[in-house]
Image: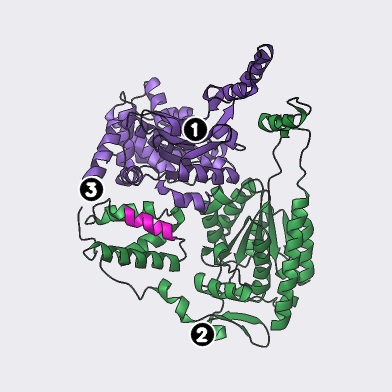
Amino acid sequence: MSENSGLSPGAHGIVAQLAKFAGALRAAGVRVGLTDEFDAAAALTLVDLLDRAEVHRALRIAFKLPRDAWEIFDRLFEEYWDGRRAPQHPALQREPRGPAQWRWDGERVHLAAPDEAPESAGERYSPEAVLRRKPFDQFSESELAAMEKLLARLALKLATLRSRRLVPAVSRGIVDLRRSFRRALASDGDFLKLARRSRPLDETRFVVLYDTSGSMDAYTRVLLAFAFALRRVMKRVEIFAFNTRLVRVTRMIAPAGIPQSLIRLSAGVPDWSGGTRIGGCLAEFVALYKQTLIDRNTTIICVSDGLDHGDSVQLAGAMRELRARARRIIWLNPLPGDPRYRPEAAGMRAALPFVDHFRPAHNLESLQGLLRLVA
Amino acid sequence: MNEDIRSTQAAMERCGYIAEPAIATAVYLAKEMQKPLLVEGEAGVGKTEIAKVLARMLATELVRLQCYEGLDANTALYEWNYQRQLLRLKIAEREAREPEKLEQLIFGREYLLERPLLRAITRREGPAVLLIDEIDRADEGFEAFLLEVLSDFQITIPELGTIRAEHIPLVVLTSNRSREIGDALRRRCLYLYVEHPGFEKELRILHSKVPGVNEQLARTITRFVQRLRARDLRKRPGVAETLDWTQALVHLHSDALDAETVHATLGCLLKDEHDIRATAKESVAELLVYATAPE
């Protein structure tokens, strides 16, 4: 079982190696803090460093990696702990590669890496959407910026609407003896009024599932801005991006603002503006996050045009599972803004039976309509 | 492998827990680094059992805090025995006692109800094993509170003062992942994710927990369950279910699996109506062919 673990001799070498490894994990989007590094270092002093499998186990335990981070961990471990240094790892190169940019080609907004032609990030197997010229995709850069401010206000309104619904119960609930005693002090030890406790209403949770495929390009910025705005005012919002893969982007959202977030997102989400595999991505979401993120207080907002050449049976299965667990599912589709639109894409048809509200999201007015639903 | 980890693994096995290297490593590290161990995994993979075995292994007391929605600090830490205090006050009204003395009396240790967390840190005989079970069921606020207790291992009771841990207990937290555990708490712990056991391990567990089962049946059962788990189920059967099923089959004196018996006892394995319906006749037949095929 023992084989060379690839460590340079001496504690210093190990610590340096560990720091590099942790850095690579972070760059790949796994959250590893300084305390985790300390723990990992402490753990390494306790295990057999020549046993690679044991180092692997110990690091996974000490870094506290959740199940969904194992894949990345295993991959990076391969590269870092067998002696092969891997500065060429793409995860490390992402940052300096330079930001992707939004480009305006006179007709619509594109997200493209600077060294890439805007058109190269075309649809891989999402069919070319016929219905592109929607209000959102006719926005200019400055209009987009103004729109983002509006969205932030809208989201704030959404958040406050919800909190007003919390009604504190005064005279119901179980007797709170501890507080009753304290109150009795005011009246020389007589219990004039019993203090009571009851459970407050639970907060609504939001999960936003975001289609970033090529056919959604024109809408991505505005709709993401909306999701981000939600995230800023509400504690319990999780945001996922999907195209051919599912990526949890909640934490990629920079507090600094939407442009920075978009840069990080385009670096962190593979295949941005690529094709779509809605069914596969939703199935993955169900498998990985159904347990932790979806409960009876969760509203799922799925933003997609449903243009999918993947497996619509799989999509229906995933939607059924989500429906069974979530409070409601809202599907926002940028296409219904066009009067000619009928929900006829195979993916859309498969998903519709499980959707509580199917709404257009092609302009601000339609997003405001959403407010009534979520409030 | 490190000798100490190997001996941890052996010790756990002596206490009736077949531990993979990952589990033994986690337990060993938690013990050595004096850090709580957060164990996650699907229901029925034996998370709680780790704490129980640990207590048996160290011949110490297992203090269990079962979490549930609405669990608060009072229930987890301590509570004054208000009823008893009130009675004492009533009695005291007839005696003419000095108020200070009386106060000292009713806020004494004997009027204090120890809840699990307090109990775990005040055990005098040696470190206890503190099991905080299903932490994901408690509210997020409780997590923050727990964080404080787990970092300082001291509890302040205004009327009594600060109580410091006699011995730092060995803490095991389990979670079914019905919600995500906060980062702060996760950071404070070591983390272990337990998966469903593989064939060899499950077979060994089966033999150690159900001694009466014959080798052939045990192998068939294990293969059947392993295959069943690979299917698309809402609730995949855990080891606990396998053991229940085996016990049921032993009670029914079945020496081999047949379709009829499987159907009659499927409820031991699958606890979801949808899953039971999905595992219809053909599927059972298919699973059986696989399970009983010569290896």
Q: Identify the element where label 2 is drawn.
A: loop
For this orientation, the residue located farthest to the top is: B94
Letter of the chain shown purple in the rendering: B
**Gap between marks 1 and 3 measured at Cα:** 35 Å
- Nearer the camera: disc 2 or disc 3: 3
Tell me which residue sits at (58%, 67%) in the image.
Answer: A253
**Residue B104 in view, yes or no:** yes
Residue toward you, A256 or B109: B109
User: Mark 1 — residue?
Assistant: B118
**Gap between marks 1 and 2 measured at Cα:** 62 Å
The range drawn in magenta is A33-42
User: Mark 3 — residue?
Assistant: B2
Which label belongs to residue A280? none
Color used for chain A? green
- Whether A280 is drawn above or below A326: the answer is below
Identified by mark 1, the residue type is Leu
Judged by its main secondary structure, the magenta piece is helix
Q: Residues within 10 Å of mark 1 (few under 14, many from 20)?
A: many
Corner quadrant of residue A111: bottom right
Q: Mark 2 lies on which chain?
A: A
Does residue A77 appear to the left or right of B72 in the view shown?
left
**Residue B45 in view, yes or no:** no
The spot of residue A192 in percent (x, y) is: 79, 27
Q: Residues within 10 Å of mark 3 (few under 14, many from 20)?
A: some
Residue toward you, B176 or B34: B34
Q: Does the magenta stretch include residue A116?
A: no
Specify whether disc 1 shares its chain with disc 3.
yes
Corner quadrant of residue A183: top right
